[in-house]
Structures are given as C-alpha cells and as structure tokens.
Image: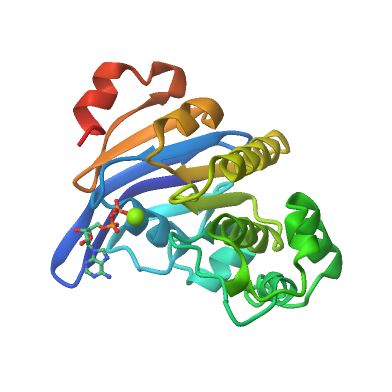
Amino acid sequence: MSLQVDGLITAYGSVQVLHGVSLEAPAGQVTCVMGRNGVGKTTLMRSIMGQIRAKSGSVKLGGRDLTAEPAHVRARGGIALVPQGREIFPKLTVRENLEIGFSARGATDQAAVEAGMDMFPILRQFAKRNGGDLSGGQQQQLAIARALVGKPSVLLLDEPTEGIQPNIIEEIGRVLRRLAGEGMAVVLVEQYLDFVKEIGDRFAIMDRGQVVARGATSELTGEVVGKWLSV
Ligand SMILES: Nc1ncnc2c1ncn2[C@@H]1O[C@H](COP(=O)(O)OP(=O)(O)O)[C@@H](O)[C@H]1O
Ligand SMILES: [Mg+2]
C-alpha cells in the first residue's frame, strides 16, 4: 500500500511548523525526506504517525483516510515509526523490547518476534541483554526490528544512521532495500547524502516547513544539494 500525505499543516501552540506538506511514498520504494536541522522533518513524521495532530491536511494509506484517527489506529492500519533517537527501553531485554512492538496491535506474535531477530542476527545473540547495554547501532537495529514486528505496510524512519558506525549503516541499508523489494513503502528521513543515493528511489527536500524540491534520487544534482542541504 502507498502512503499519500496532502497539505499537512502542523503547529506547536501558535507556532506553525508545517506549511502544507504533501508527500507520496509508493509501495515498493524508498522515499527519502531530506533537509537541514529544524525544517520540520521530525514534525512531519510525527504528524503522519498521528503523535501530533495536524491542523489540516490528510494522511491516506492505500486509499484509506486515516486523518481523523489517533496513532494507535494508524499503527493498526499499517504505519510504523522508528523515532529519532531510537527510544528503546533500556531496562527491558531485547526480546521484551520486541514484544512491546505489539502493544499497539494487541496479541503478541512470537513468530514475528523471531522474524525481527532474523532480520538483525545480533538481536538474537543479545536477546537476553538489556536494551541499554547495546551499542548505538545495535539499539537502532532493535528499534527498526521493533517497528517491524507489527508487519507495517509503511515504515517511517527518522534519521536512523545518526551517530552509527558504517558497517551497521550498511546492514540497515540492505534491510530497507529488502523491505522495499517485498512491497513496503519506506520513508527515510536522512541527512547522509551518500546513503540516500545508495538506497533511495525518490527524494523530497524540506525547507522551513515546506517541500522545496522532489524527484528521483538520480536527479539529486550538486546544484540541488548546494542550494538546500549544505550548511
Ligand atoms: N515539541 C515542540 N514544541 C515546540 N516546538 C517544537 C517542538 N518540536 C520541534 N519544534 C520546533 O519545530 C521546528 C521543526 O522541528 P523538527 O520537526 O524537529 O525539525 P527537524 O526534524 O527537521 O530537525 C523547529 O523550529 C523546532 O524548534
Ligand atoms: Mg528531526
């Protein structure tokens, strides 16, 4: 199923942060959302997930309008978010962190927990360790696996490579490509240009709460990058 976001306007109190953002994330593709710090990427992800209520605009998944639905209904409808900063539970074990992925969806599905550990084998090896004892990259893998146990059709990832060692970035990239290959719509917020060019199909660049450029990642020219992404 494809994700379609139209005209999202989101504010914190009286400060408007998203000024009518539209984004299409087709099934089977990796759609990258780029932009400098503070332009509204995280706010967009949280608005799509329903953790923040947009003032107007719509969020549709496979044609189903989820705009009026709270986050847990969107989760059951097939949207999952890997939040910026990972937010795993440090005092719970790896396995317990994965089981918590079901809290939004009801019954625990042990087969899906096992599948999450198959995706990143280090998680099986460390199943009984506390989440807080993993490295940053391993925690990111755990956060991704946790988002996947509910078998979403859309996976939103907010800067998953931030502060992570290159070999784990590569492993995450392979998993995201595989998920897209299986038909998932992957939305990747990413500042690391090489990673976008390597695994992304499409991009949207945001500036001050709006999408200012979009296209195929093959069209990410030096001019576009220089104008919107360099600091
Ligand atoms: N919870 C919040 N309350 C008030 N302002 C916020 C909050 N979260 C983010 N902002 C502001 O909204 C703008 C966009 O932030 P954010 O969506 O986190 O951007 P990005 O992810 O692109 O760095 C920034 O100006 C930021 O200071
Ligand atoms: Mg952010």
Rendered view: 160 above or below 87: above
Depth check, front residue: 121 or 71: 121
Residue at 33% across / 50% down in the picture? Answer: 41
Q: Which image quadrant for residue 97? A: bottom right
Q: Which image quadrant for residue 17? A: bottom left
Give the percent coordinates (x, y) of residue 194: 45, 29
Rendered view: 171 above or below 52: above
Rendered view: 220 above or below 159: above
* Left or right of 174 on screen, residue 202: left
Residue at 28% across / 40% down in the picture? Answer: 206
Depth check, front residue: 50 or 230: 230
Residue at 14% across / 65% down in the picture? Answer: 15
Say whether residue 2 is visible.
Answer: no
Give the percent coordinates (x, y) of residue 87: 50, 69
Which quadrant does ligand 1 occupy? bottom left
Give the farthest residue toward the bottom. Answer: 91
Give the percent coordinates (x, y) of residue 225: 28, 25
